[in-house]
Image: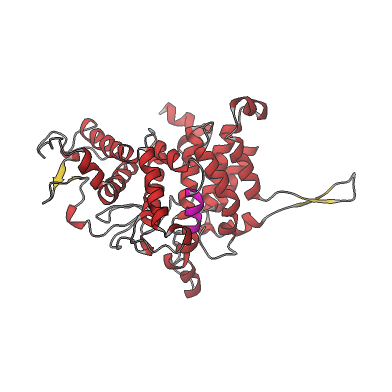
Amino acid sequence: MCIPSIRCIGNIASSCDGTHVPSLLSTTSTTTLTIAPRQYTTQSIATSLATLIQRGTLSPSIASQAGDASSVLASEAAWATSTLLCDAGLPPPHPSTVSADELVPSLCRAVTSGYAKLELKREATCALWNAVASPPPPSSPILDDNAMMKRNPETTIHTRDCILHGIVQTDGMIQSLTELIRARDADAVVTSVKLINAIHRRFIDSNSSTVVAATTSHFYKSHLRMKFDEAGIVDALEGVCDNTSIESFYGKGINQWSGNKNEEEAAEIAADLIDDFYEDTNGEEDEDVEVLPTTTPFSSMSSDLDNNNEMRYSFGVDGSSSSSFNFGGGGIERGSVSSFGSGGTAGGSGGGGSGSGMGRGRGRGNRNVPAWMQQQQQNI
């Protein structure tokens, strides 16, 4: 009964533009025991989900005592948590923002744990990204000005920066995110790249407008950059670009290949990060490397050479548009408040509009499809 209950929570949170999220996160029940004249208040949904997520980080010996389903329950709980954190960043006392204090640390432990399985890490990174991305706009335009102002990126950016700073401060987080972008899982790769992109744009970029005092010093920015260097971020980002390009060539042919949108998006963000933060490093390492002409068979990953003979990855993005970027929508200046969201492409291509997360109720493949429907699909 635990998994259906968790999915019910996620489905309710995903419906009606998240209208029911505050009620879900504020709900506790009081039980009166007949054997004792006392009332007991049960844990909130946020506390219960955080506990389930932590069970997925236990060592195999301890997990076996807790039950074989610990990892599965943890993954389901992380998915449900992602639906509850879509509105994190809205001014307190919004329950999503308040609950982030309890849920985000559990998600961070899942990402950095050496015992957590890839499925749990994937769902945890998706939930973390929902927590730091701009709250999704309502599907209904009928909102008063005050409600619209609360969802404005200018209003939510400080809270989201604080959540992101807490994520960065988790021991092993940078190394874990770097390792995840090497995983053969498109969802895990794209959300990890987006989180890394947000960290660079908000805390490493010297032009960032963040107001989190602890991140504004030059020493902090240099220290953060050094930790990424030690984690091998450049090689990992280049791997994302190369994998997408090679798959486009060897898949169905360059002219016919439609591509995986998540992989394309991750590759574009990765290419921008290399160009904007690690271009000089690549130039020093590749001084003696001959650059292949752009007429090579791998035309989808051809190099665009500018006047300084600097190599830039190309994914159908006009190199002349490098003066602006966007984490999910078009036409936003680098370092601006509105740019802190999803996407991260130089040409303004990306998914979900400015600052969008993974969305409410992101699907999880056949795991959420009833058994009789799966059987029917197999028989077709």
> Where residue 142 sits in the image (x, y, percent)?
47, 70
At x 64%, y 42%, the residue is 51
Q: Nearer the viewer, residue 54 or 251?
A: 54
Q: Is the C terminus in the top left, top right, bottom left or bottom right quadrant?
A: top left
Residue 258 % position (x, y) = 25, 40
Q: Residue at x 47, y 75 (%)?
A: 145
- State the image coordinates of residue 92 (x, y, percent, origin top left): 57, 64
Indicate the colouring scheme: secondary structure
Residue at the image point whose x is 57% and y is 37% from the top: 74
Question: Which x, y percent locates residue 34?
Answer: 88, 46
In which quarter of the view is residue 264 placed? Answer: top left
299 part of magenta stretch: no
Above or below 45: residue 93: below
Residue at horizontal 49 percent and vertical 41 percent from the top: 123
Magenta stretch, main secondary structure class: helix
Displayed quadrant of residue 261: top left
Q: Which residues are magenta?
A: 162-168
- Closer-to-camera residue (77/379): 77
Question: How many marks can you see?
Answer: 0
Left or right, residue 13 beside residue 221 = right
Q: Is residue 193 visible?
A: no
Task: Check if residue 167 falls in the magenta segment.
Answer: yes
Q: Which quadrant of the figure contains the N terminus?
A: top right
